[in-house]
Amino acid sequence: MPEKLLYLSQENVSSAGLSMARIIEVVEKGFEEMGQGRVEMPPKPGVHPGEGDNFIHAMPAYIPAMNSVGVKWVSGYPGNPAKGLPYINGLLIYNDIQTGLPLAVMDCAWITAMRTAAASAVSAKYLARPDASVIGILACGVQGHTNLEAMNVLFPLKKVYAFDTIPEQAEALAKYGRDTLKLEVEIVSDPKKAVTGCDIVVTSGPILKTPHETIRSGWVDEGSFVSCVDFDSFFSRNALNEADKWTTDNLSQYTHYKENVGFFKDCPGVYAELGELVTGKKQGRQTDGERTFAANLGLAMEDMAVCPLIFDLAKKKNIGTWLPL
Amino acid sequence: MPEKLLYLSQENVSSAGLSMARIIEVVEKGFEEMGQGRVEMPPKPGVHPGEGDNFIHAMPAYIPAMNSVGVKWVSGYPGNPAKGLPYINGLLIYNDIQTGLPLAVMDCAWITAMRTAAASAVSAKYLARPDASVIGILACGVQGHTNLEAMNVLFPLKKVYAFDTIPEQAEALAKYGRDTLKLEVEIVSDPKKAVTGCDIVVTSGPILKTPHETIRSGWVDEGSFVSCVDFDSFFSRNALNEADKWTTDNLSQYTHYKENVGFFKDCPGVYAELGELVTGKKQGRQTDGERTFAANLGLAMEDMAVCPLIFDLAKKKNIGTWLPL
């Protein structure tokens, strides 16, 4: 066959130079398409090799408006970091919608890190106060970094409170915030200081079936927005139920996680899906005093919204390896 | 990351030189594992780009006994042949069960063609008469070729009747049967001649939701085995209901296809899954006079049983392209 396939390693994907601002734009556009019922995204099946919480998920999606179809095949192995390997690994296959032929295979770790944060920022666009300038980041790993980057694109951030149980992680985020984003960063050892007084709070620790409930009632200020990247892991039930609006990116997946997997026990009822906010079918923030929350789960749609841009940039910049089909 | 990934094109995969005999062995072993409940294989979700019957399916499976886990992402575009492209295309990702990291990406067309025929042969091993020497092939495309190859591994074939509505396809199969397999091949224009008088019958045309029902009651001899590679497309309902044993490779997928997709209308009740035959939980052929049928659907398990062998052969023979993760 004369057809060819572009392979992009993790280094290739990140060096394509796709900006967080552009990722936020296409992820928002993807949520608009979803809100209009124009995205095909079946449930993601998984397999579970070995002991413990290992998983590998297949995440297919088709977005007609973006000429994008493909699948992300992504693994999470909790034991990997102890072996010096990343927790999350995987590949994404991007196909030609006209012929079904694969156009590209690319590493998915960078895309996953960026699009997850972009979805937080899209939620914040509809749910946070536009003048939000103080942000608290609780758990300062990959998602702590990318969420800070994404929020900084949309909001006039000035001050960051960084909390992590591992001091090196907090230091790394502080350095990134100061050197790259030119923000004032204060590392705090009391998690309350990364919540109370913050306009935006991001919890980005490990996702746990039994929440550690570090954040207590009374900590989240009136008027704040919280992005629960780690689902409900960081919050006491009382603190969660102070939410005026509790939202998610996909209700059917949320319901599956709640009813069949055991997450989101005793959480507030879901006010809206993100697609409903983006399309205006439901109102986002309506008053300055509301406490608004997003518990986004991560969708195949987001990956398939981003990968065509990376493919186009890589072709333009001659990045990657062309392979015969 | 120091980790590397092996890419195998369609040419690389076929030139690895894995034999049909070996593929039949591992596919049978895979069905044994399935029959013992030791394979994790969630339902395969799909997306459907464009108009008509286009599909792309994600097919994940994990076979602990073979240290194999991965996904096949395979498209079927009925309009492709008119564009000079194959109907079936796709890639398979093979992962390390210990770390979740991808080990290889390989073209899946060759594997799909071979493992589908191997599953037919495994069904035949349990359901056809061991002395079967006359075979009829109805529709002589890729599956006509590989099914003939696979049956020839397990049975003392002498004579082939080849039927196809496209004369060039029948000619191609005749040439392959004569030159490569050293069999006597007769091309027939009457489909009945590729059924009556045959010990094994393979129907390998396109899969249609509305069967064309070419094969009529009274055509299938007592004692014959039929592999319905194209589901129930070739058979009148009366002819199907002459089956003494109607089997499939996976009952839950069969039931889904029957109840939700519209295949297998008015077909006989399923006597056994192939895994039940392989493990001896149900008897295969019990008398010389039974008419036995297999309507296998194609399982991710089969792909994941085959791909580790290709990976090992390719490494040994220095085939393929090594890529950075």
Image: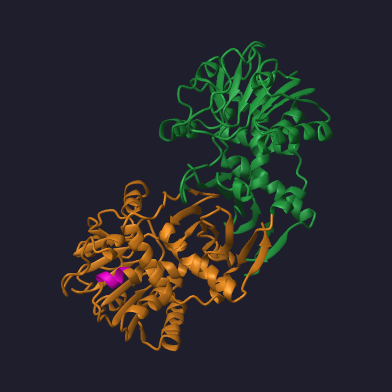
Chain colours: A orange, B green
Residue B183 placement (x, y as % from top left): 81, 27
Q: Nearer the viewer, residue B66 or B198?
A: B198
Q: Quadrant of residue B199?
A: top right
Name the image quarter holding the N terminus of chain A.
Answer: bottom right
B291 lies left or right of A239: right
Chief secondary structure of the magenta span?
A: helix
Residue under the point 83% across and 34% down: B179
Q: Nearer the viewer, residue B151 or A291?
A: B151
Q: Nearer the viewer, residue B117 or B4?
A: B117
A165 lies left or right of B85: left
Residue under the point 57% across and 42% down: B300
**Number of marks:** 0
User: Taking the image as drawn, is residue A57 in sight?
Assistant: yes
User: Taking the image as drawn, is residue B25 in sight?
Assistant: no
User: Is residue B284 on the magenta stretch?
Assistant: no
Residue B178 placement (x, y as % from top left): 82, 31
Name the image quarter holding the C terminus of chain A.
Answer: bottom right
Residue under the point 45% across and 30% down: B258
Residue B99 placement (x, y as % from top left): 58, 58
Is residue A224 shown above or below B184?
below
Which residues are drawn in magenta?
A123-127
Is residue B12 shown above or below A320?
above
Residue A71 placement (x, y as % from top left): 50, 55
